[in-house]
């Protein structure tokens, strides 16, 4: 067996590519070659292959990377289905996939149609199913409506009579006293709360107006008893290895509240995620939002078996986040903020864009691709059109002294 290459030998080999490979890639190659204990010959082969692949991946000057990325994502999107599926292995949760989900991502919707969180727990807790179930119970939102069997409005005494469901009370881990405390927390409450049976509570509202009593009825049913606002449902899901053995348990939720969930004891903050990109941006910042956009687009494509170059997905995420804020790909975001009048007009609401630009006296310098295609008076600034060539002619001395006419 060949001797493993030494650190000193390897470093000198890698530094020979100082002007070709970026620093991050050189460091990664150094660590991986040492980790796998390669011989000098094997290390040289790996480095040569890395250089070959790196050079093959470089973009040629003048390449229309934006248009290539748009086509790379746009063409597979036509093959996507328009359905909502059950989450893999979880019948209780639905998740929006395909084109509707892709549209949600690039439009940066305030809230996805099916907000979902994947909550991972710290290693010392993740294998204890009882503890994971307890945390799931704490996280899941429980309102009065969830544990109530029947609700009756008494128009004579202007009261609301709640008949609680004993089975649901036990399942949700709450008590009748918890319900009473929730009713007593109602802001501007005038009436009183009485427990009139083992599982019966009467709330005398103090209201003497039927429309207001009905509004109070809706408000009472929505009162939070325990759990995190926005988390409508939480289930525990086992994670298995290749042999089918349970490695750990994680919690999947219908609904999302990243900030509140990250504050729960036992939650692994480094792995817990949500499919709500704006929430990621508000809680964790723009870099995390960029990573979330990339991951969410990749998930949609992978679910349909579509292979898109990872760099094209990164290009879309970069365009949406490079200003420091998450912007949609549309007339209210990336497309609508272009400096070119013609580029904005070509996307949507053509007349409106042209009229507003005329009123403001805007000038289009025709520096981009779209506007030059529209006008057609000069090469578009991509490919050979991106190059401006200047030549200096030097005439032979004899020709200059010949006295002949040019």
Image (cartoon, grey):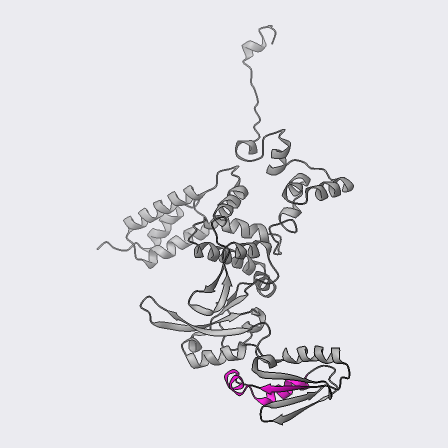
Looking at this view, is 3 or 333 the one in front?
333
Is 282 drawn above or below residue 389 in the view shown? below
Is 90 drawn above or below residue 74 in the view shown? below
- Is residue 176 a member of the stretch shown in magenta? yes
Pinpoint residue 292: horizontal percent, then vertical percent. Answer: 52, 59
Q: Quadrant of residue 2?
A: bottom left
Quarter of the image where the C terminus is located:
top right
Looking at this view, is 180 or 69 the one in front?
180
Is 17 drawn above or below residue 235 in the view shown? above
Helix, strand or loop for the magenta stretch, by majority? helix
Pinpoint residue 389: horizontal percent, then vertical percent. Answer: 56, 28
Pinpoint residue 218: horizontal percent, then vertical percent. Answer: 67, 77
Decide if residue 159 is in sight here: yes
Quarter of the image where the N terminus is located:
bottom left
Residue at the far left in the pictured view = 1
The span shown in magenta is 160-185
380 left or right of 29 in image? right
Decide if residue 368 is in sight here: no
| Residue found 43% across the figure and 81% down from its top | 130
Pinpoint residue 132: horizontal percent, then vertical percent. Answer: 46, 78
Q: Number of callouts in the render?
A: 0
| Residue found 49% across the figure and 45% down from its top | 75
Looking at this view, is 397 or 311 the one in front?
311
Residue at the far front in the pictured view = 156
- Is residue 161 a member of the stretch shown in magenta? yes
Looking at this view, is 28 or 194 the one in front?
194
| Residue found 66% across the figure and 47% down from its top | 336
């Amino acid at each position: 067996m060949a001797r493993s290459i030494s650190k000193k030998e390897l470093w000198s080999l890698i530094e020979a590519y100082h002007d070709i490979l970026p620093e991050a890639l050189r460091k990664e190659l150094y660590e991986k070659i040492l980790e796998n204990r390669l011989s000098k010959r094997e290390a040289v082969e790996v480095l040569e292959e890395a250089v070959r692949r790196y050079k093959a991946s470089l973009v040629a000057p003048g390449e229309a990377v934006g248009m290539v990325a748009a086509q790379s994502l746009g063409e597979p999107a036509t093959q996507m289905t328009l359905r909502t599926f059950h989450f893999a292995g979880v019948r209780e949760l639905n998740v929006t996939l395909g084109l509707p989900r892709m549209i949600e991502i690039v439009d940066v919707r305030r809230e996805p149609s099916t907000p979902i969180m994947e909550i991972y727990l710290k290693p010392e807790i993740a294998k204890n199913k009882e503890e994971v179930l307890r945390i799931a119970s704490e996280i899941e939102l429980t309102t009065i409506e969830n544990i109530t069997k029947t609700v009756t409005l008494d128009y004579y005494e202007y009261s609301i009579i709640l008949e609680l469901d004993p089975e649901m009370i036990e399942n949700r881990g709450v008590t009748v006293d918890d319900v009473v405390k929730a009713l007593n927390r109602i802001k501007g409450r005038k009436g009183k709360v009485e427990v009139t049976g083992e599982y019966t509570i009467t709330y005398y509202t103090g209201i003497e107006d039927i429309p207001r009593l009905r509004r109070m009825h809706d408000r009472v049913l929505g009162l939070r008893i325990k759990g995190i606002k926005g988390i409508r449902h939480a289930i525990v899901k086992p994670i298995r290895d290749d042999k089918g053995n349970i490695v750990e348990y994680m919690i999947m939720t219908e609904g999302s509240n990243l900030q509140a969930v990250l504050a729960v004891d036992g939650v692994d903050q480094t792995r817990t995620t949500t499919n709500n990109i704006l929430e990621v941006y508000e809680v964790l910042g723009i870099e995390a939002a960029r990573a979330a956009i990339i991951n969410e687009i990749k998930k949609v494509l992978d679910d349909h078996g579509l292979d898109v170059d990872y760099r094209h997905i990164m290009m879309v995420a970069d365009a949406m986040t490079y200003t420091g804020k998450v912007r949609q790909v549309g007339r209210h975001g990336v497309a609508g903020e272009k400096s070119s009048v013609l580029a904005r007009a070509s996307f949507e609401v053509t007349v409106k864009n042209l009229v507003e630009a005329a009123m403001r006296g805007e000038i289009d310098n025709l520096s981009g691709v779209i506007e030059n295609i529209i006008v057609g008076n000069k090469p578009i600034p991509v490919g050979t059109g991106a190059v401006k060539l200047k030549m200096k002619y030097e005439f032979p001395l004899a020709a200059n002294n010949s006295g002949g006419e040019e």
